[in-house]
Amino acid sequence: MARTIISTVLAPAAIGTYSQAVRVGDTVYLSGQIGLDPERMQLVEGIDAQIVRVFDNLKAVAEASGGSLADVVKLNVFLTDLAHFATVNEVMGCYFSEPFPARAAVGVAALPRGALVEADAVLILGG
């Protein structure tokens, strides 16, 4: 199957050797997003703002692929402090509705650029 690279200026440009997302058939693999403002390419301040920015960035890439966050079937969330997990749940409620995607939440020692949270996703289009 052919791979299609997904890119949008509404999410931060890739800062390494990766694409914002790759589509294979009806499956789209969204790369990890941290709380970077796509215009300034700087982290937004604070955990609450970073969590919102992460989901805004994922939403922009999902929409660039022809889908939406409603198409997400798997979400991975990485936090430098699992004490912020409740905030992730609260913010997710603003971006996702039932049936919710499968999800993993993992505590990590560090994230790129000193980010406090990162998330990636897999979505299925037309499902």
Image (cartoon, rainbow, N blue to C red):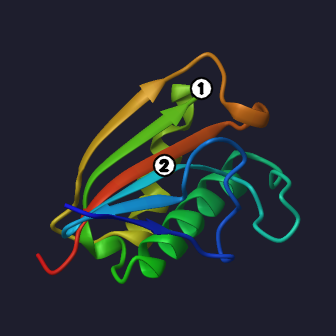
Q: Quadrant of the C terminus?
A: bottom left
**Residue located 76% across and 67% down the image:** 38
Q: Which residue is mark 1?
A: 81
Q: Does residue 72 appear to the left or right of 46 in the view shown? A: left
Give whichever of 3, 6 is nearer the camera: 3
Taking depth in this image into account, of 42 and 80 the one nearest to the observer is 42
Which percent across, then down, holds residue 14? Answer: 67, 53
Q: Provide residue 89's location: percent of width, then percent of height.
A: 41, 51
Disc ID at residue 88? 2
Residue farthest along the top direction in this orientation: 109
Which residue occupies 55% across, 32% down? 79
In this rendering, would 64 be left or right of 70?
right
Q: Residue at x 66, y 29 (%)?
A: 111
Residues at marks 2 and 1 touching, judged by CB atoms closer than 8 Å: no
Crowding at label 1, few (<14), some or many (≥20) Cα neighbours within 10 Å? some
The extreme front residue here reads: 2
Q: Is 119 displayed left or right of 13 in the figure? A: left
CA separation, marks 2 and 1?
Answer: 11 Å
Callout 2 amino acid: Val
| Quarter of the rendering occupied by the N terminus | bottom left
Q: Is residue 39 depicted above or below 110 in this figure?
A: below
- Against 100, residue 104 (above or below) is above
Relative height, residue 76 to residue 124 (above, below)? above
Amino acid type assigned to the residue bearing label 1 in the image = Asp
Q: How many marks?
A: 2
Q: What number is the disc on residue 33?
A: none
Q: Quadrant of residue 13?
A: bottom right
Residue displayed at 59% across by 57% down: 54
Graded by Cα atoms within 10 Å as few (under 14), some (14 to 19) or many (20 or more), the crowding at tag 2 reads many
In the picture, residue 57 is in which quadrant? bottom right
The image shows residue 17 at horizontal and vertical percentages of: 62, 41
Instruction: Classify mark 2: helix, strand or loop.
Output: helix
